[in-house]
Image (spheres, helix red, strand yellow):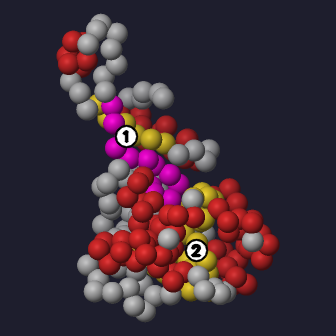
Amino acid sequence: MAGVPVHAALGYLHRLIGAGHKVAICEQIEDPREAKKRGAKSVVRREVVRVVTPGTLTEDGLLDAARPSYLAALSAGAGELGLAWVEVSTGAFFVQNLPAAALAAALARIEPAEMILPRPLLERPELFEALALVKDRLTPEPEARFALAPARERLILGFGLATAEGLSAGEIAAAGALLEYLERTQAGRMPRLSAPR
């Protein structure tokens, strides 16, 4: 934990994110006078208000204006993969169903700043070459975060849809995992997103 002046926060964020770190941003939730009542050396209570990762940047000073900064998610579906990606600063949200052989081309086209995926996908030999393209940008997650039923519910509730029909199981799982990851890293303050296309 390190305290930095607010006016210098962007510089520190730029260096830390550039080095591949995730940064938890905390704010005081207690008046310093209240902390002193507990003792002269009491620490003022703080709470995580956001976790900044390479794929969740929204600060203009940290984004490259020449190209989008995508957060992607990969999930296994019935015989194919589901790929979802979002540009958090603009809210553009996309999904794609694809065979394993097409993953490398899709990742080269999207160039995600960060990609989440269930840990077991890291062990699939047919994905080794494609995942090597983004190995320094991978964030393995527990497989449960890609579960189909909660993912479907997240999509329906999150976008006010009547159904998730038209999307494959892999697309639903990947898109739902993205929504869950954003909810978790943004401490409940979801960015405005367009419905997945």
> At 50% across and 59% down in the image, what residue appears?
55
**Residue 161 seen in the figure:** yes
Q: Which mark is residue 188?
A: none
- Expressed as whole percent of the image width and height from the top left, the position of residue 63 reads 47, 57
Against 141, residue 95 (above or below) is: below
Occupied quadrant, residue 136:
bottom right
> At 42% across and 63% down in the image, what residue appears?
180
Look at the image and say whether residue 109 sits in the magenta stretch.
no
Residue identified by numbered label 2: 75
Q: Around disc 2, counting alpha carbons within 10 Å, would you say few (fewer than 14), some (14 to 19), or many (20 or more)?
A: many
> At 59% across and 82% down in the image, what residue appears?
77
**Residue 194 seen in the figure:** no
Q: CA distance from mark 2 to mark 1?
A: 28 Å
Judged from this view, the residue extending furthest toward the bottom is 166
The magenta stretch is 46-57
Quadrant in which the C terminus is drawn: bottom left
Residue identified by numbered label 1: 48
Residue type at the position of mark 2: Ser
- Expressed as whole percent of the image width and height from the top left, the position of residue 186 reads 37, 53
Look at the image and say whether residue 53 sits in the magenta stretch.
yes
